[in-house]
Amino acid sequence: MPAPAPKLSTQTLLVIGGTSGIGLAVAHLALANSIAHVTISGSNPTRLAAALASLRASDPAADLTSRTSGHVCDLSSPATTEHNLRALLAATVAANGAGTLDHVVFTAGDALAVVPVADLTVAALHAAGAVRFVAPLLLAKLLPAFAAPGCTSSLTLTGGVNGQRPAPGWTVPAAR
């Protein structure tokens, strides 16, 4: 009897914030577990190219070029976040060959402005929440149109330890 196909062999994955850290590790692990296709995104084209090269070099015996793709996606401007996410999702399903997405992991983050509460402004609050609060909510809004139907697709959002045990001065960055 032939060995069963790996569970991920027909699945697709998008990692938003996949150019470093946890996001890149998730992409590497998915490829190591025979996922059909991984797309990573990030706001920096140079880091995106380096991360894609790292993924594609992770298994020299396999041709990972056809199983990986990357797209630049800037989530820092609330005026363009929804448009940029919609474009990312459309480009991802076009590149993965499946026409839908099975899994999305959101690990994106930006440089946190640690500002004392006494110095907060409305503009600073809006900027602090653009990538870590607004973007995941808009992603949840848009994803059903691109996700595989049924209970087997997933959206995973990540956060850091400062959400549980904020350091002094982290009032806004740690807020959820």
Image (cartoon, rainbow, N blue to C red):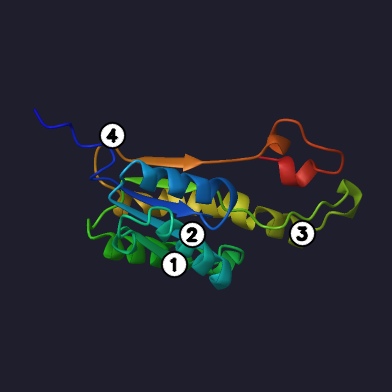
- N-terminal label among 1 and 2: 2
> Helix, strand or loop at disc 3?
helix
The residue that appears at 80% across and 43% down in the rendered structure is 170
The quarter in which the N terminus is drawn is top left
Q: Earlier in the sequence, mark 2 or mark 3?
A: 2
The kind of residue on which mark 2 rests is Ser
Nearer to us: label 2 or label 3 = 2
Along the line of sight, the residue nearer the viewer: 116 or 22: 22
**Residue type at tag 3:** Ala
Mark whose residue sits in front, 1 or 4: 1
Q: Secondary structure at mark 1?
A: strand
Spatial CA span between label 1 and label 2:
15 Å
Q: Quadrant of the C terminus?
A: top right
Q: Amino acid at mark 4?
A: Cys
Q: Disc 1 designates what residue? A: 71
Q: Position of residue 9 (x, y in %)?
A: 25, 43
Counting other residues with Cα less than 10 Å from the Cα at mark 3, is it few (<14), some (14-19), or many (20 or more)? Answer: some
Q: CA distance from mark 3 to mark 4?
A: 38 Å
Indicate the quadrant where residue 5 lies.
Answer: top left
Look at mark 4 in the image and give the residue it sits on: 151
Name which of mark 1 and mark 3 comes first in the sequence.
Answer: 1
Q: Is residue 48 left or right of residue 13?
A: right
**Mark with earlier residue (3, 4):** 3
Between tags 4 and 2, which lies in front? 2
Direction left: furthest residue: 1
Q: Are marks 1 and 3 in contact (CB under 8 Å)?
A: no
Identify the residue position indicated by label 3 in the image. 124
Label 2 sits on a secondary structure element that is helix
Instruction: Say which amino acid is labelled 1.
Output: His
Q: Are marks 3 and 4 in contact (CB under 8 Å)?
A: no
